[in-house]
Image (cartoon, rainbow, N blue to C red):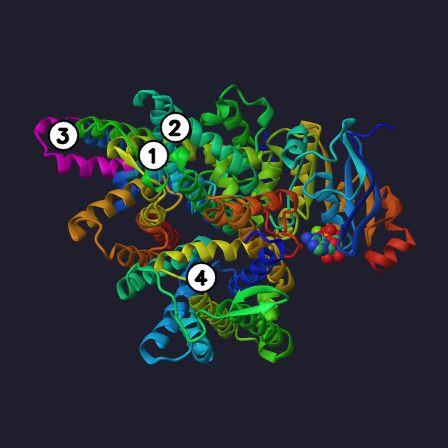
Amino acid sequence: MGQLSQVVLDGIVLGGFYALIAQGLSLVFGVMGVLNLAHGECVLIGAYLAWTAQHYLGIDPLVALPVIMVLGFGFGWVLCKTLVGRVVERPPLMSLLLTFGIGAVAQGVLLRLFSSTPRVTTTSYSDDVVNVFGLTIPTPRAFMLLGAVVILVLTWALLNRTRVGRSIQAAAQNKAAARVVGIDIGAVYAIAFGIGIALVFAGGTLLGSAQGFYPFLGPLLTMKAFAIVVLGGVGRMTGTVLAAMVIGLIETMLASYVPSVGTGLGIAAAFILVVLVLVVRPNGISGGKQVTAGV
Amino acid sequence: MSSGTPTIGTAPHQKAADRLSAAPARGLASSRFADPRLRAGLFAAGLAALLVTPAFGLNNSALLLLSTVFMWIGLTSSWNIISGFTGYVDFGHGVFFGIGGYTAGLLVTHVDMPFWYTVPLAPVAGLVFALLVGYPLLRLRGVYFSIAMLGAFMAMRELALVFRDFTGGSGGIIFKAVIDRTLFYYVFLGIAVAVVLGTVWLRRSQLGSSMLAVRENEIGAEARGINTTAVKLTAFCVSGAITALIGSLWAYQTAFIDPAIMFRDILLINLALMVTLGGLGTVWGPALGATVFILLRETLWGTEGEDFLLFFGVALIVVVLVLPKGIVGSLADRAHLARARRAGKEDGR
Amino acid sequence: MTALLMAEGVTCRFGGLVALDAVDFHVGEGEIVGLIGPNGSGKSTLLSCLSAGRRADAGRIRLSGRDITRRRPSTVARMGLTRTFQDARVFGELTVTENVLLSRDWTRLPSFGLLRPPERAARERAAMLLDLVGLGGLAGEKAGSLSGGQQRLLELVMAMMPGPKVVMLDEATSGVNPALIAELSQHLRLLHREERVSFVIVEHNVGFVFGMADRIVVLQQGRVLAEGPPAEVKSNQEVIDAYLGA
Ligand SMILES: Nc1ncnc2c1ncn2[C@@H]1O[C@H](COP(=O)(O)OP(=O)(O)OP(=O)(O)O)[C@@H](O)[C@H]1O
Ligand SMILES: [Mg+2]
């Protein structure tokens, strides 16, 4: 404990997870302008899916991961086509309220199905550790970081190297123009939302074997992801990753260096950081889309 | 002075509009409720009835139900000032409720102040917090502000939990119980009436118009000489101070506070739901939404059971999709439409 | 020479694009200045910088000798420099009268005036200005239900309401019925005479602006291409090539 390099490593691992879920939020927000307040609940749905697969079917989360991501994509796609897509063009409050409602429903359903008892997805390697340069990481956390990196790289490739990805980016930059060149904007929204949810389902799956989770964790995760998106600048993957690392590091440092109260201050620290950054740099660490009212 | 000059823009529908304002308005929403004297009369009569109600031996649970309605009218109407009038939708407004409760609780436990002395200090605490947080956050655009406030809310809950030597942590703070339903009935009634009348008056004042202007176009409002930062901050401070006041009273009524109940997520959902149901940014919508919602919940649901999250979530989704402008907003739209249609008919003749 | 509005070396960049390149611009007392130039030449940007809506990257702007470069836009408006927008920015949810009353002279508000409905004098001035442009009959309507041309006229009234020293109009004639443009110029002349206000008129309607202005400034790619009395500018070969055409 307390050894700086270990703390930094822990922070990076946590940051990798945050980067994954923040990227999902950022993608949806960047493309649709919808801030998904049910984001954290979606992470939890992923976690509970993995838990269920392990608990009842004995499938390892890493094996289930691709399937869960496909489910996530489908879930996001359907959610967008049935509910979220209807409010995209309306005032932002409507999508906030709607996703707030979706989050509440998800929380209620999770409570019903799994009760408020914390769960952990136990695997054959749950108690193992990996040694790196004399530092240790529990194996599930190592997989969390590894999985996050792989998925983020694949997402980057998808967004920048494929036709679909470029349509998404075009729509994010200019909806009207995207329409003119014949991009089906409704489909783009659904795909972007699907990808976003697939990312957080993956995040949940990886998180679930690394630490305990329970239905009320959702808003906390949403907030962290939001703080990261603001810090990093909307729609900038490098910014998001950087900001996620910052938040991850701050959190682990608080936990190890601030006696007794540090572990409980994750949100407060992230929030204060966001406020400070916004005062100094209204458009986030790396610039990007305008965040302030412009007056 | 412009007698000789022909006027610009003498479009046909201008004449229609002239006729409109001259003709006695007919139809449901416009005719009966448009008369301000009638509205004031109805309001006074209703208020008188509510004032004498406790004298008729209502049982405690009925009194509690009514004072809950009043409390929510106060909360929704004050939330509406920042969220509805200026359009900066505050998704963490519960933070003020918590701050109010904790201001009272901490003063009572640490300074041993009599409770009623702490009541005026709670809104001051809310105001100071609104100033500190509002200055940086009100520069953010709509959605960012909303969720940043949610962050403020969660951060304050965390702080209340973590600094347990000071706040009592999750163990909370116990007040000396004062169980006087009639007293709270009148207190919350007074707050509800004051806030609703304040809203009516605000909507007519220049400050209120400036808030609406900020909601519609901030850069445009600034160009018209309105200091938009000052307007937003004022709305936020007023809104936060009222909510903090209600929070402190609620804490007193409940006689116990802890982070989980003073900073309740459900409060945020309730606020958003009731105000959307009634009509965000309208004068009477929040009060109506609160009343309808609480009475409905009471009859359909009883107490907040296990599945209340599910229930609220579904209700919120349905309201957003079916009645996005709320009851008052939709009625106003219909009245407007009817008026326009009538004007069109008269034009056609 | 001390002009009423005096801008020196105003520079404004959008990323790599230099929208205004060290522009000098001034408006004298009671003067009507026409500001013309091709699309994207920086006219609207110049108005934004002058009214403090956008902070200039370099340069100094003074109004009646006082530096306004780093003031809030609302402060500048209160000091007597108001504008309209190319996309008329009226408040659709408020009535026409409320729109005008919002744009009053805030510095002359009676004590606690903000907390009260607007006072009699302000109402009368609002009604007078609305009648002047023919919007009197629509005073009680929501501004959002007005036509595009009517909204422009309303915005003109809003800019006039506080009794400013300089009013800057960004394409006041666009979307206004051609038959009414002549009337608009009459109204502007009347206001100019009665209230002794200076105008800056950004226009693509060449006939209108050359008929109104005492002096014309031509912008091209963020620089002043030519400046002078209308007749002189009209015959300037560079201006003809760049903007007016043969
Ligand atoms: N917010 C902005 N961001 C980036 N570039 C901008 C912005 N506003 C204006 N520009 C650029 O600045 C230049 C000047 O624009 P401006 O609107 O001032 O032109 P204008 O002379 O008013 O043109 P028009 O006659 O079409 O109204 C243009 O090249 C425009 O693309
Ligand atoms: Mg322009």
Which residue occupies the foreground of this view, C237 or A104?
A: A104
Q: How far apart are marks 4 and 3 (CA)?
A: 46 Å
Element class at badge 4: helix
Q: In this rendering, do the residues under marks 4 and 3 share a single chain?
A: no
Query: Which residue type does callout 4 highlight?
Result: His
Residue A175's image quarter? bottom right
Please tell me in which quarter of the rendered image ligand 1 is found.
Answer: bottom right
- Residue A228, position in %: x, y? 56, 56
Q: Distance between the residues labelled 1 and 2?
A: 8 Å
Nearer the N terminus, badge 3 or badge 1? 3
Q: Are marks 3 and 1 on the same chain?
A: yes
Residue B53 is labelled as 3
Which residue in the protein does label 2 denote?
A: B122
Label 4 Cα neighbours within 10 Å, binned few <14 / some 14-19 / many ≥20? many
Q: Which chain carries label 2?
A: B
Q: Can you give x and y, in whole percent of width and height, for residue B271 in the image?
A: 34, 45
Q: Distance between the residues labelled 2 and 3?
A: 29 Å
Magenta region: B51-71
Q: Position of residue B127 (x, y in %)?
A: 46, 30
Hey, which quadrant is residue C243 in on the image? bottom right
Residue C39 at least partly seen:
no
Q: Nearer the viewer, mark 4 or mark 3?
A: 4
Respond yes or no on whether mark 3 lies under 8 Å from ligand 1: no
